[in-house]
Image: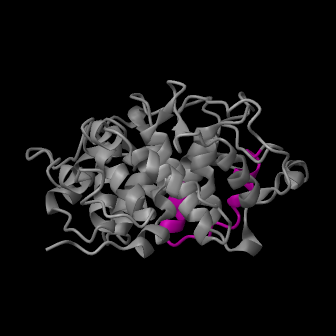
Amino acid sequence: MKVQFSRASTVLLVLFAVIAIAGSGRVAAQDGTPGATPALTEGGLGGAVTWLRAQQADDGGFIGFSGESDPGVTIDAIIALAAANDAGVDTGDAINRAVGYLESGDVALVYIQTGAGQAAKLVLGLIAADRDPMSFATVDPLSIVQNGIDDETGIFGGGMFDHALAVLALTASGDDVPGAAIEAFAATQAENGGWAFDASTAPEAVDSNTTALSIQSLVAVGHGESDLVANGLMYLESVWTEDGAGYSDLPDTAPDANSTALAIQAFAAAGMDIANRQPALAMFQNSSGAFHYSASDPSDNLFATVQAIPAMALAPPAEMATPVTFRDELAA
């Protein structure tokens, strides 16, 4: 019998939107398609969506590091667009076109074979797009997730970022999450409350992105009141400044848009008020409507934009991230 898929739960956890993380867990800068960006007619969420839609390639995908359409980035864009759509922003046919790219050729097949984390991302993207993750383009990504747990460690995929994605995918699909998977969060939480991309428990290895996603997955599976979440939130507070969140709490780590957005999503998942954190994210928005990664690289960044959109969509319209035109006033 097929499980029941809940897009409502996906929207509730727009928290799901994640970026394609490189092996180190850091996000590299990526410019938007040259000449593809229309003049900005609005800031905030609407402006970000306008810019993002302009980056969609002719095949429906969104461009990755290779310079060609990439399934991981395309899934991130689908989730971002779905979050914006549910917040009342017109996304046109962008989601259907992106799904069409994933459905073409062997794109989905090759992507899910790279690991349980990738399969989990596809599951989340398909649910956000109202598609069945058990039957898509001749593949069953949900089964890859279900069978991707390590019997010894209880960890899905290659580390805790993959693991958190898998727990989110199982939860959104209405599937059971093994007890060993929850125990894995406890076994891999560092003494400072954070989690590391590769499941290391060394405090210096911890990063805010993996921690934020782990918190979201624990909340999704019903452990929002646990010490695991409380300690994880304390770690996120340690990396949060008035300018946003940094990737780690190591010295000289500057805030970046991706870490800021993921932290906001984790705070929201835990039921915390995020209205006072939204302006920090808005400061990363450029006049084009896109977001830049950090102050050291102010160029339009596709990865930063797809991550920022769901975090912006969490707030009601009256509390939406401040449009870029007010950024300088906020920073003063």
The residue under the point 26% across, 62% down is 170
Q: Position of residue 305 (x, y in %)?
A: 64, 46
Q: Which residues are magenta?
A: 263-285
Position of residue 1 in the picture relative to residue 311 (left or right):
left
Residue 200 is one of the magenta-drawn residues: no
The residue under the point 73% across, 31% down is 299
Q: Nearer the viewer, residue 67 or 206?
A: 67
Q: Position of residue 40 (x, y in %)?
A: 84, 49
Q: How many marks?
A: 0
Residue 268 is one of the magenta-drawn residues: yes
Q: Note whether 90 is above or below 200 in the view shown.
A: below
Q: Position of residue 145 (x, y in %)?
A: 22, 52
The residue under the point 61% across, 43% down is 56
Q: Nearer the viewer, residue 128 or 210?
A: 128
Q: How is the image coloured?
A: one colour
Position of residue 227 in the picture relative to residue 286 (left or right):
left
**Residue 319 in view (yes/no):** yes
Q: Quadrant for residue 259, please give it.
A: top right
Q: Note whether 125 is above or below 12 in the view shown.
A: above
Position of residue 52 in the picture relative to residue 174 (left or right):
right
Q: Position of residue 139 (x, y in %)?
A: 24, 50
**Residue 235 in view (yes/no):** no
